[in-house]
Amino acid sequence: MTLQSSGQISLGDIANEFGYTDGSSTKLGSYRTTNGQGNFPLTLGSLQYSSIDGGGSVPTSGQIKLSDFRSTQLQTVVNFYGSGKGGNRLNAFSRYNSGDVTVVGGYRTRPTNTSGTRVKIHVNQNIGSEKNSVNHCALRTGNGWNSGTTLSVDVGPSGRIQGAGGDGGAGSVNNGSGNGGSTGTSGLGVEYTETAVNIASGGVIAAGFGGGGGGAGGEQTDKPGTRYAAGGGGGGGAGLPVGLGGAGGITNAGNGSGPGGAGSNAVQSGGTQGSGTAGDGGAGGNNAGEAGGAAGGEGGQAGNTADAGGNGDGTGGSGGADGSAIRRTSSGIVVDINDGSRVVPNAVANGVA
């Protein structure tokens, strides 16, 4: 735990915090360098440590004193930054417990009790969610941290935590109504208070956006033989993974309509902050120029909610709701966001599953 800020401090106190440098004994001067991690400054992903305490209080050359360690604490970094360390629906506490964590300095293993330890959940890969439930988050902090842990989520310039895009709704059958688009899911789930969220330029935490509604169908009745035309499928919402376009509607006579387009997960510059683009709605059917179906709605993306499908003789399906960029288990969880411009949308909702 964090070393005392005043009064007597011993070499044993320091060794208990940062590890013994030589088996069961320790040399104060050894803390100026690392044990097999390379000399300071030490780079882990996009994070850089100037000294073993992370803040430069402990010198890396020249004279070193016991008093240099007052108010310092062990630094650990959970690995979501290395090659292959991304994925879908991940849990940071589980990864910490698995041992995929670096202890700065390298003189000890990770503490099983994290009280008084600084833990950085460092993300510099893509982490996506899964579809269907808005409470499902791409990355959860986990709730097993001991009270007194100094916890942060640090997203690097290549890091992306984003919910899945909702699928577009299917177009109508005959002249019926279109189906609603699916809801997007969510990015970061915070389950420990207090958690700091730091996002470097280029990084993003984003919601998955809703799918567009399916279009309604139409009919023609003023001539012998009723004609029908089906509605187009809704476009998929932007997300990771993307929402799929809804199926085009069908008619009994086989006069189908267009499927909706899939959303995009391409990283963009500008206002979308890497959240991707929505898929377009599919075109409605056309039956001999006499009956026409309505188009499906465009899927959602940053700054634009999903559109409902167009109305015809039936009603267009509603657009799916967006997920959240950041969710927390309850309103009592404190989330300190360093740069809200890289949180899309910049709001914190309650409920994590």
Image (cartoon, rainbow, N blue to C red):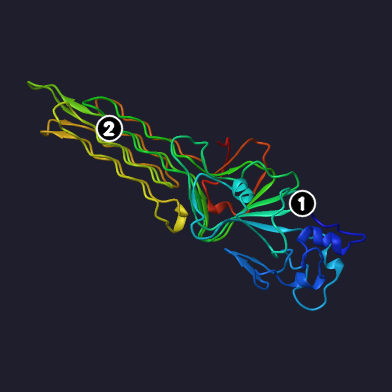
Q: Which of 243 and 7 is in front in this view?
A: 7
- x and y percentages locating residue 298 in the rendered image: 34, 41
Amino acid found under the numbered disc labelled 1:
Gly
SS type, badge 2: loop
- x and y percentages locating residue 3 in the rendered image: 83, 57
SS type, badge 1: loop
- x and y percentages locating residue 328 in the rendered image: 61, 39
Residue at horizontal 25 percent and vertical 24 percent from the top: 176
- The disc placed on residue 171 is 2
For disc 1, the neighbor class at 10 Å (few under 14, some 14 to 19, many from 20) is: some
Q: Residue furthest left?
A: 224
For disc 2, the neighbor class at 10 Å (few under 14, some 14 to 19, many from 20) is: many
Residue tagged 1: 116
Q: Quadrant of residue 17?
A: bottom right
Disc 1 or 2, which lies upstream in sequence? 1
Q: Quadrant of residue 200?
A: bottom right
Q: In this view, does 92 lie above or below 20?
A: above
